[in-house]
Structures are given as C-alpha cells and as structure tokens.
Image (spheres, grey):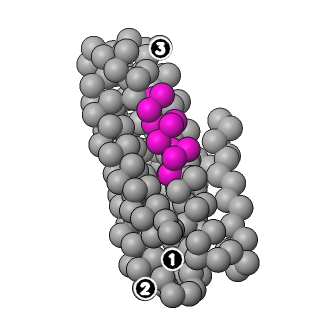
C-alpha cells in the first residue's frame, strides 16, 4: 500500500459525543433511525421504479407526483443518515445489523391503482415506525431527532392523503 493510500484510508476513532444525551439513548435512537433509513431507501427505490413503469389514464399525474416524492425521499435519506452520524454512529450499510433492504415490486404486472395502494401501505408503515422512534427520542430529550421525525411524518402523511385522493372513487 502506498503512502497516499494509507493517508486516505479512514482512521477509525471513538466518537466522543457529549451534548446531553446518555450513551444508551443515543444508541437506541441511532438504531431506530437506521431502520427508518433502510425503509426510506426501499420506499425511494420503489417510488422511482413505479415512476418509470406506471401506465394508464393517470400516467401523467402519477409520474409527476412520484418524481416529487422520490426526490424528497432522497433528501430525507441524507438528513436521516447525517443525524445518525451526529449521534456518534455510522450510517448503516445495506446488510449491516439486520437492516437489509428487500424490495418486492412486480411493477411489470401492477396496475397504476395497485402501485398507488402499495405506496400508501409503505408510507403508512414508515409513519408508524417514525412515530415510535419519535416517541423514544422525545422520552430521551432528543429534541433534534424528534423534530426531524415529526417533520418527516408530516410529509409522509400528506403524501398518503394525496395518493389516496388519486384512487378514491
């Protein structure tokens, strides 16, 4: 290994985070956020694939809406990962610590209505996990993580409302 390669290698060091949260609380919150990050990535990919593959009379509406959604989800993954880092933990890698991302699509055989129903279900599942994580963050006085999660839940709940409006008779 050359000197340049050695100099560029990451140097593991202990993260000494001391901004008022106890170590156990930070660990629990980071684990919760890691699971949410994995779910958010899965939802991002699914939304993007549906964006490409939707057909039918609602094509334009769904295509435009899902583009806004996957762009927002991409920004959210960065925000969540950076919060995990601020807590003193590494952002998870797929397959690390049980946070595997599994995406079952079948997009080629789903109708636009089925895609929307699937996205509604995924968003609602994510909201439930975020709600639990927000409650845990609030109990630990981690107002930053709590605030971030409340903001994300607000976006997901609005998204569910808009998606439901597309498929309601």
> In the image shown, does 4 or 75 lie closer to the viewer?
75
Residues in magenta, as a range: 123-133
Q: Secondary structure at mark 2?
A: helix
| Mark sitting earlier along the chain (3/2) | 3
What whole-number distance in Å separates the C-alpha atoms at marks 2 and 1? 10 Å
Q: Is residue 18 visible?
A: no
What residue is drawn where x is 57% and y is 86%? 55
Residue plotted at (55% across, 66% down): 116
Residue 125: which quarter of the image? top right
> Which mark is on residue 24?
3
* Residues packed near mark 2 inside 10 Å, few (<14), some (14 to 19) or many (20 plus): few
Where is residue 61 shown, x and y percent of the image? 41, 80
Task: Estimate the x, y position of residue 81 in percent, counting from the top left.
Answer: 42, 44
Question: Disc number at residue 60?
Answer: 2
* 120 left or right, relative to 22: right
Q: Quick check: is 132 in the magenta stretch?
A: yes
Q: Position of residue 161 (x, y in %)?
A: 40, 56
Dot 1 lies on which element? Answer: helix
* 75 sits to left or right of 57: left
Examine the residues drawn in magenta and state their main secondary structure: helix
């Amino acid at each position: 290994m050359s000197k340049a390669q050695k100099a560029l290698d990451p140097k593991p060091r202990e993260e000494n985070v001391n901004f008022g949260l106890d170590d156990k609380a930070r660990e629990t919150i980071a684990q919760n956020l890691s699971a949410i990050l994995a779910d958010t990535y899965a939802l991002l990919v699914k939304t993007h694939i549906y964006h490409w593959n939707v057909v039918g009379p609602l094509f334009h509406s769904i295509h435009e809406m899902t583009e806004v959604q996957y762009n927002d989800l991409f920004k959210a993954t960065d925000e969540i990962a950076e919060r995990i880092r601020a807590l003193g933990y590494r952002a998870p890698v797929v397959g690390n610590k049980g946070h595997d991302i599994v995406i079952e699509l079948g997009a080629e055989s789903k109708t636009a209505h089925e895609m929307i129903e699937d996205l509604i279900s995924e968003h609602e599942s994510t909201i439930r996990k975020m709600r639990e994580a927000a409650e845990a963050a609030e109990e630990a006085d981690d107002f930053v993580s709590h605030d971030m999660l409340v903001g994300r839940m607000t976006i997901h709940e609005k998204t569910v409302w808009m998606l439901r409006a597309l498929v309601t008779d």
